[in-house]
């Protein structure tokens, strides 16, 4: 199904009159087994779409939280191939939840565009976010993904003016990921009032749903963002929750899924409370 799964999910969310909730986890953090258990539990906990990070040694757009998670993933032995194996294992038990890989270009270049796209599609991957692949250099990768029906999901930022948005949104599919703050992941807080006009501008430029990420850490901030965006992304806060559980000899799977439930409830109820 690939990109069709993303389109179907956003159509269903629109029909329900609510924003979606997108969760991010890093493959191999704290272990392969724990990651798979978290992945399998995410839909029931309230995740509408899932981003699965593949570890890389130089995650330049990330703050300390995701940097450390990538290091732990690498220490667990998770390669890009291993991440695809995780995706395949998840998809065996879930035919509906969109699954998006997120990471950096170097491992994909090493793998090869066409082999990667072929294997990702076979594993049930629906989309790909490549943080450090500029649109001007994305043609060969986009061609390979298009051949397999996988969405290339691009990032727009507060510094993306109208001219740049035309380039960013060309050949983008599935949705656009709007980075709500300037800087790296997990450091600053997002302001829904500031983000709202930008979301409208990106949506108009792309004709696609807009998911907002970076700086969403509390149910309150998730709920506010759900009133202006088509989807809300939580990543660093979930990674932090899992790391804290490991440090306390607690169950990271339970802790992460509990956090997902609290954020998902806020996202799901945001527009209803706005209308009340």
Image (cartoon, helix red, strand yellow):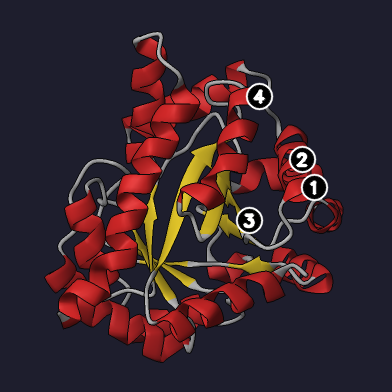
* Camera-side residue of 125 and 38: 38
Q: Earlier in the sequence, mark 3 or mark 1?
A: 1
Q: Residue at x 55, y 67 (%)?
A: 153
Q: Alpha carbon of mark 1 to alpha carbon of mark 4: how far? A: 15 Å
Other-residue count near label 3 (Cα within 10 Å), few / some / many at <14 / 14–19 / ≥20: many
Residue marked by disc 4: 33
Residue drawn 83% across and 72% down? 147
Along the line of sight, which residue is nearer the eye, 89 or 16? 16
Q: Nearer the viewer, mark 3 or mark 1?
A: 1
- Image marks 1 and 4: residues in contact by CB distance under 8 Å: no
Tell me the number on the disc at residue 89.
Answer: 2
Quarter of the image that includes the C terminus: bottom left
Residue drawn 25% across the image and 46% down it: 217
Q: Check if mark 1's residue and mark 2's residue have beta carbons within 8 Å.
A: yes
The tag on residue 1 is none
Rounded to the nearest angstrom, the CA distance separating label 2 from label 4 is 11 Å
Position of 274 with respect to 149 (left or right) is left
Query: Mark 4 or mark 3, which is nearer the start of the sequence?
Result: 4
Distance from disc 3 to disc 2, alpha carbons, whole Å, reads: 12 Å
Q: Is residue 209 above or below residue 47?
A: below
Q: What residue is at 38 percent from the left and 75 percent from the top? A: 230
Pointers 3 and 4 in contact (CB under 8 A)? Answer: no
Mark 1 and mark 2: span between their CA atoms?
5 Å
Q: Which of the numbered marks, if any, corresponds to residue 92?
A: 1
Q: Residue 99 shows which numbered tag?
A: 3
């Amino acid at each position: 199904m690939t990109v069709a799964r993303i389109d179907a999910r956003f159509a269903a969310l629109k029909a329900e009159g609510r924003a979606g909730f997108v969760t991010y986890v890093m493959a191999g953090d704290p272990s392969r087994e724990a990651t798979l258990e978290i992945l399998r539990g995410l839909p029931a906990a309230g995740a509408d779409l899932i981003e699965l990070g593949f570890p890389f040694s130089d995650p330049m757009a990330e703050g300390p939280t995701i940097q450390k998670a990538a290091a732990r993933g690498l220490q667990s032995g998770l390669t890009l191939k291993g991440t695809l194996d995780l995706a395949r294992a998840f998809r065996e038990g879930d035919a509906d939840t969109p699954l998006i890989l997120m990471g950096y270009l170097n491992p994909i270049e090493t793998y090869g565009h066409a082999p990667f796209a072929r294997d990702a599609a076979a594993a049930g991957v629906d989309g790909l976010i490549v943080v450090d692949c500029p649109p001007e250099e994305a043609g060969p990768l986009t061609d390979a993904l298009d051949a397999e029906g996988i969405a290339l999901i691009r990032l727009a930022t507060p510094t993306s003016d109208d001219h740049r948005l035309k380039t960013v949104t060309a050949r983008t599919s599935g949705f656009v990921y709007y980075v709500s703050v300037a800087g790296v992941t997990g450091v600053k807080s997002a302001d829904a009032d500031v983000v709202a006009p930008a979301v409208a501008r990106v949506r108009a430029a792309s004709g696609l749903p807009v998911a907002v990420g970076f700086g969403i850490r509390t149910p309150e901030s998730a709920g506010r963002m759900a009133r202006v965006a088509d989807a809300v992304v939580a990543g660093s806060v979930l990674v932090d929750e899992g790391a804290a559980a490991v440090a306390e000899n607690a169950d990271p799977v339970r802790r992460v899924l509990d956090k997902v439930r609290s954020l998902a409830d806020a996202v799901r109820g945001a527009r209803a409370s706005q209308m009340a």
